[in-house]
Amino acid sequence: MATQKSQTTPPLELAKRIHDQADLFSEHVLRRHLWSKQREVLQLLSAHSKVAVASCHSVGKSFIASQALLWFLFTRRPAIVVTTAPTWRQVEKVLWKYVNREYLRLPKDLQGLAVCLTARLTIAPDHEAFGQSTDKPDQFQGIHSPHIMLIVDEAAGVSDEIYEAADTLGAGGEYRELLIGNPTSASGKFFRAFNNAELGYQSMRIDALETPNFTGEVCPEDVAAELIQPAKVAEWASDWGIDSPAYQSRVHAQFPSGDEQAIICPLAWFDAARGREVETTASPTATIGVDVARFGGDKSCLVERVGWDLRTVTSYAGIDTRELSHLVMERAMNLRASSGLSVQVNIDETGVGAGVVDQCKPHGGGGITYAGVNFGSSAGDAGRFANLRAEMYWRLRELLRQGNNEPNLSITATGPETDRLAAQLSATRYEYNANEKIKIESKETMRARGMPSPDEADAAVLAFLPQAPGLTIEVW
């Protein structure tokens, strides 16, 4: 269809339409197939100054941002395009990976006008696009051009401080702004763009059920392969629960409902930690948290951390305590060898977990210590927490909360188990009991409202068990 238009439309008329319509630039200049929602995003951005897009997972968010960037830069002169994301890694390794790839699809004469580097595309000193980190808000000030575009990828994770600094970009001339990402936080500028009409954003959502693999919309096989798959959505429904914030955000593009302060870890906090650089400390510790399965559908889980880096999340289904004990000891020895640090192994000894502790106990020593932990025992700060479980979960919450007094926690672990951990922490609620102590909802309560057992979450809090005096753990 796009090829027919390019053959019948007079060149000057087509050039003007491409100047005014980013979707035509993508189809005619970059020779890309756009499915319906991708086209709608580019059409909104062509017609409006500010656009906010809340999308499900795997719909080509960064691809669309790259199309918008190249359209604006190559149809205006001079022009500046500023791009950012919650972390520099996301700027450089995600968004600009697409920009570099799409730049190579430009006609040779357009490629020859510019120099494309890792996170900068320059036509002239006053005519370029570049990536900007979010660690220094003042970097967004003092940028001037008759034509300016701001692109914010994974927009829910960018702080209001950055948005306030970037507001100066739209002070004069032509201005375009694209905020795009998963709606993981019910606060912040991205959330307000959808809920405060006075901010002037044209907003849209892209639900997984609106994508070609669900609707049957015709698109090339290579495009369909990169989009969210029905099998993956079904897997997430089982793993995360259809009412969990993670499922609602990554499948239905819905912002979390209710008070973020009533859950242990808002999804945006977890996502921020996933993209964060690992902080080094003078005396790092190595710890493994072990949650032992109790019921048929539960999984035994191991979480490893070194210093402030949550490195691995591994789950095992259908193994007995003897097999799990051997796995735990093997992992402890491997972590001891790879890190060069003493290793603390914290095992939930409630119920069948006691058997794992008993089997690991004789193998302690050589820099490896095994500890049995009872979640229901008294908290170190018994005046504030109902039990040790509440204190442990709160400890992890505080490490994930930006602005805490400790080094920032990083999550370099990947894979479906890490996704489950995100879903569990963002679905686990807390409350204050009759004695005004913090209490974490039980696994039984979570099951009653359709949430899976928080196996990975229990292992994670064990991995970050505070080694403070007064905690009731038994060490052999």
Image (spheres, rainbow, N blue to C red):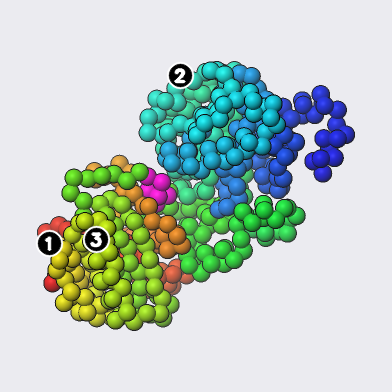
Residue 274 lies in the magenta stretch: yes
Q: Nearer the viewer, residue 333 or 468?
A: 333
Q: Nearer the viewer, residue 140 or 427?
A: 140
Q: Earlier in the sequence, mark 3 or mark 2?
A: 2
Magenta-tinted stretch: 270-276
Q: Earlier in the sequence, mark 3 or mark 1?
A: 3
- Quadrant in which residue 46 is drawn: top right
Residue 174 lies in the magenta stretch: no
- In the picture, measured across the screen, residue 268 lies left or right of residue 305, that is right
Q: Residues within 10 Å of mark 2 (few under 14, many from 20)?
A: few
Q: Nearer the viewer, mark 1 or mark 2?
A: 2
In the rendered image, residue 217, in percent from the top left (x then y), is placed at 74, 55
Give me the C-alpha separation between circle 3 and circle 2: 50 Å
Give me the C-alpha separation between circle 1 and circle 2: 53 Å
- Mark number, residue 470: 1
- In the picture, measured across the screen, residue 472 lies left or right of residue 316, that is left
Q: Amino acid at mark 3?
A: Ala
Question: At x 64% / y 28%, what residue is drawn?
Answer: 111
Question: At x 26% / y 44%, what residue is drawn?
Answer: 280
Question: At x 80% / y 29%, what residue is drawn?
Answer: 14
Report the residue marked by disc 2.
Answer: 142
- Circle 1 sits in a helix, a strand or a loop, which is it? loop
Question: At x 20% / y 56%, what residue is drawn?
Answer: 341
Q: Nearer the viewer, mark 3 or mark 2?
A: 3
Q: Are marks 3 and 1 in contact (CB under 8 Å)?
A: no
Q: Residues within 10 Å of mark 1 (few under 14, many from 20)?
A: few
Considering every residue shown, the one lying at the far right of the view is: 8
Report the residue marked by disc 3.
Answer: 337
Asked if residue 63 can be seen in this view, the reply is yes
Q: Amino acid at mark 2?
A: Gly
In the rendered image, residue 276, in percent from the top left (x then y), is placed at 37, 45
